[in-house]
Image (tube, rainbow, N blue to C red):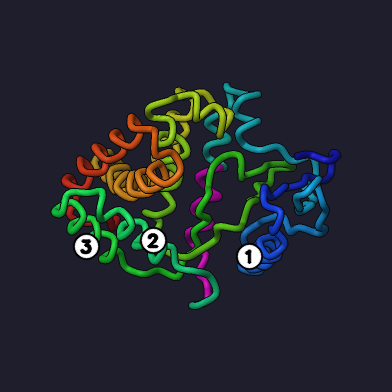
Amino acid sequence: YRLNPDTIIKVYKNSDALDDIKRERELAKTALVLGVNTAIPFDVVKVGDMYGSVFELLSAKSLTKLIVAEPENKDKYVKIFADMLKEIHETQVKPGTLPAVKETAVKWVEWLQPHLPEDTYAKLHKLVEEVPHRDTMIHGDYHTNNVHYANNEAILIDMDTLSVGHPVFEFASIFLAYRGYGAVDHSRVQSFLHLDWDTAGYVWDKLIDLYFEDKDEAFKESVKTKAQVIGFTRMLRRTIKREPDNKELIDYSKEKLIEFVNKVDSLVF
């Protein structure tokens, strides 16, 4: 929430969030030291029974709000979005400083074993295990709500999912935000991103085009396919755990996961 023109507050929907707030503060400091432009929380407040962090963001607006307000300039804002992502992925982190996202992804796969055909599970597990470790930064929750812009400067927020690893894991998360979670019910994209389904699809496609601007279309499509392997892994697990009665989304996620696992021999690009 914006408190005033200079500050915003991030409220944690958890009454025991003080440890999470402290952790995010340390992760944000780590990113800032490594050269990533981010907002550091400078105060902790109580909001009802919950806690929040106060950040200084001088009249900055999210890229989402700018895209909605200025649709004629959406390419400009998606380029800022892509450039910030490249900067994150070019940031080398000292080994052991941040958690490795691959370890989490392997746990997603192993949790799904009872829910997948044996051959699909075996191949999926092998694909994820074979992704090489990288000590490059991953944001983990990268979308246009989490990149703010003011005075020709992009600012990254929500640093609690910061980790290291191969960019395929980042693109999987981005795919879910812009396409995956809303594939069955498009209104979910509007509720989460505050972008309509078509605009969200445009941002996803344009991001891939700009990030991989020196690559051909076949390469770009292969990145999308590989990202969807991880994306649907995460989405299937999440839906089974949180929405066990949502059979349509569970069946869709499982069908797509099996389809994309069968299309690839590696998740590396």
State left or right for residue 140 relative to residue 20: left
Q: Residue at x 33, y 44 (%)?
A: 232
Residue linked to disc 2? 166
Image coordinates of residue 60 in percent, x first then y, are: 74, 41
Q: Quadrant of residue 42?
A: bottom right
Image coordinates of residue 83 in percent, x first then y, are: 53, 48
Q: Residue at x 66, y 43 (%)?
A: 148
Q: Are marks 2 and 3 in contact (CB under 8 Å)?
A: no
Kind of residue at disc 3:
Lys
Most common SS among magenta residues: helix
Q: Are marks 1 and 2 in contact (CB under 8 Å)?
A: no
Residue furthest to the bottom in view is 95
Kind of residue at disc 1:
Leu
Kind of residue at disc 2:
His
Q: Quadrant of the N terminus?
A: top right
Q: Residues within 10 Å of mark 3 (few under 14, many from 20)?
A: some
The stretch of residues the image draws in magenta is: 81-94
- CA distance for labels 1 and 2: 19 Å
**Which is closer to the viewer, label 1 or label 3?**
3
Q: Residues within 10 Å of mark 1 (few under 14, many from 20)?
A: many
Residue linked to disc 3? 126
* Element on which disc 3 rests: helix
Q: In this orientation, does residue 64 appear?
A: yes
Query: Could you say which is closer to the camera, residue 221 or residue 242?
Result: 242
Q: Which mark is residue 27?
A: 1
State left or right for residue 43 relative to residue 223: right
Q: Are marks 1 and 3 in contact (CB under 8 Å)?
A: no
